[in-house]
Amino acid sequence: MDEQSQTRSRKLDHVRIVLDENVAAKGIGTGFAAWRMPHEALPDLDMTQIDLSTSFLGKRLRAPLLISSMTGGASDVEVINTVLAEAAQHLGLAMGVGSQRAAIGDTALAASYRVRHIAPDIALFANLGAVQLNYGYGVDECLRAVDMIGADALILHLNPLQEAVQPEGNTDFRGLLPKIGAVCRALPVPVIVKEVGNGISAATARRLADVGVAAIDVAGAGGTSWSEVERFRHDSAARSARTAGAFADWGIPTSTAIRQVRGALPHIPLIGSGGVRSGSDVAKAIALGADLVGTAKPALIAAVDSRGVTQVIAELQGFLDELRVAMFCSGCGDLAALRRITMERTDHDA
């Protein structure tokens, strides 16, 4: 199988496995359950007037929610990005596409990522694996990814654990930081660096900010485990499957990563993602320091429902309804107020 066919096959494998198998992180949670928001019995608010709007990297959003990068690169999944984009446009949210490596190698696959005709107003993020900067990619490929979809920013994702246990993984991560910096300096749009589900530490976030990265997505542990996803791509009896399975509890919990990165970088635009499964999680992520909150699997499940965009809108509107109730019952009329509340820690492991 050639590299492009292999990439397309991997994309389809990933979607199938996430939908059909139990690939949740094991033995580690997001940490959101360890935090309680303050209850205000007498909120001086009209809940219908609570303002969820925000700005992120210069784009105005009606709510602080990102449909996180998921897929693309195969004709079979083109409809998923189309449905997600239509929902993002309807609700005024941000959206990232999956890694565009497949379409950089085969321009015929670019259509599976292009959603601007459906979502002309959303904050839209292109996406490439940072490690590809060690495998022949450079500024030109990053520009092509941005231009391909009319993106407002480029995500460079970091996924060392996934690459380490992936059958065809790229594991040379040497010297990436200056290459990321070169991309930041050359691109006409901001660069976001994200993990894929194992978190970014405060120290790493500082190094990224120092070379010009405009925003960080911590993408912490506690949601989908990509080492678990890759485990299902190996023969279950193989030593490689056992190795992948040994890392289902690896990483920095999402709530911890948000707090630590925000503490280290008080002003950097920060996305909190990784295991976000409710509007209450969104509220807690913002209260802990996130500017924008990403979710993926709930939207993916809804996108493949027979009701398509209607179901995605309903799912994500549910997140926003829950966020609004959490803000109302905490006495927060807008996101600035939500960021000022004092959270109560309910255990000592968060």
Image: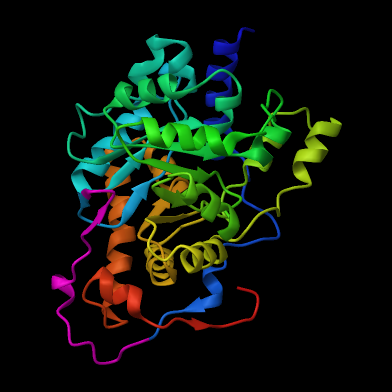
Measured as percent of width and height from the top left, residue 81 is found at 35, 31
**Is 139 situated left or right of 91 in this image?**
right
Q: Quadrant of residue 40?
A: bottom left
Give the residue at the far top of this rendering.
2
Q: Nearer the viewer, residue 15 or 265?
A: 265
* Residue 280 shows in this picture: yes
Is 56 included in the stretch rendered in magenta? yes
* Residue 326 shows in this picture: no
Q: Residue at x 26, y 78 (%)?
A: 332
**Image height check: is 8 above or below 198?**
above
Say how many tags the image has: 0
Is 25 included in the stretch rendered in magenta? no
**Image height check: is 138 above or below 207?**
above
Which region shows up in magenta?
39-59
**Image height check: is 247 above or below 181?**
below
Q: Quadrant of residue 97?
A: top left
**Is 83 situated left or right of 160 in this image?**
left
Q: Nearer the viewer, residue 78 or 100?
A: 100
Measured as percent of width and height from the top left, residue 325 is found at 29, 73
**Image height check: is 160 above or below 112?**
below
Most common SS among magenta residues: loop
**Is 163 situated left or right of 56 in this image?**
right
Q: Quadrant of the N terminus?
A: top right
